[in-house]
Image (cartoon, rainbow, N blue to C red):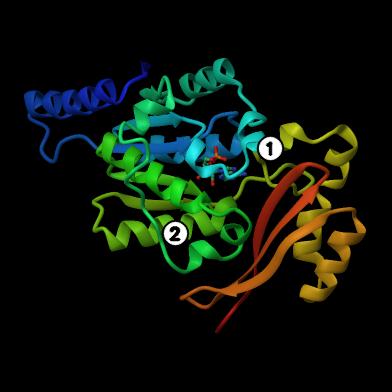
Amino acid sequence: MKILETTKAFQAWRVKLNAKAAYLGVTGGTSVGIVPTMGALHEGHRSLLKRARIENDFVVLTLFVNPTQFNQASDLEKYPKTLEADVRLAEATGVDAVFIPRDSEEMYPDTYRYQVSEKEFSKELCGASRPGHFEGMLTVVLKLLNLAGADRAYFGEKDFQQLTLIRGMAEAFFLPTAIVGCPTVREEDGLAMSSRNLRLTPAERKIAPLLHAALTGASDLNQARIKIENAGFKIDYLEDRRSKDGELRRFVAAYLGEVRLIDNVVVGVRV
Ligand code: AMP
């Protein structure tokens, strides 16, 4: 497994794959699947890597805690880091290359002068309380997909708003990369796996699954709100949204102590 620390090394790795395919006479080149992450990997990330492993000739994992998508310095500082374990997990899952930019200048040689923005959905839900978050996320995802020359890119439904915006960007900019959405992986008690769960105290960890239980077990939004607040969460937003294909999804972001948790579930389908 290759460890790549610069954008130049990443691009050179990609070019070499094509050259190798041409040398071997492989028609259509070699396919590359990318799994962008911020590290502190868990089974949710691993499910994306496994899917990418099945569907592509080469799999690249990226580990980069992207500063432009954090709107609070303290949140960025406290983001969990488990680099050695992440590299071990990647190796054990059959990843071919891991891109770990050595610093943020590597990703932002223009000092973030050029940015991707979206005018509507990115301002709602998580975008309403985290200004600039989705611009930072979309910008770094576009850079990573381009560096990888990716045929497919894998994202979790756990961050459904993010997945929707990435799909929209890929369509708007005619990106050659297929965006693949993967189901949310949960702990046995229903809590959506998240790197941020590492920051919960033992007492908070016991309460945390009540967020998912309230999403799935309430008859309506109001009842869900009461359940979530009674469990001790401070709600940032709780909303139902219908997608273009008629699926009704319930979205929540709520604070448990200092930790902001998000989740979403399908609550109905239009027939
Ligand atoms: P992150 O490292 O949190 O930025 O996440 C990297 C990717 O993993 C994103 O596409 C997330 O949606 C996805 N992901 C995170 N948690 C989960 C989960 N519990 N199940 C499935 N995918 C996840």
Decide: few, some or many residues near mark 1? Use Cα within 10 Å; few <14, some 14-19, many ≥20.
some
Q: Which residue is mark 1?
A: 196
Q: Which residue does the image show at 14% across and 23% down from the upper left?
A: 20
**Residue 172 appears in the rendering:** yes
Q: Which residue does the image show at 48% across and 26% down from the upper left?
A: 93
Q: Judge whether 125 appears above or below 241 on screen.
A: above
Task: Give the Cα distance between marks 1 and 2.
Answer: 22 Å
Q: Position of residue 160 (x, y in %)?
A: 55, 57
Q: Quadrant of the C terminus?
A: bottom right
The residue nearer to you, when weighing 72 against 102, is: 72
The residue nearer to you, when weighing 114 against 10, is: 114
Q: Which residue does the image show at 90% across and 37% down from the upper left?
A: 203
Q: Position of residue 87 (x, y in %)?
A: 50, 19
Q: Which residue is mark 2?
A: 165
In the image, the residue with mark 2 has its CB under 8 Å from the nearest atom of ligand 1 = no
Q: Judge whether 99 appears above or below 29 on screen.
A: above
Lateral position of residue 245 relative to residue 231, left or right: left
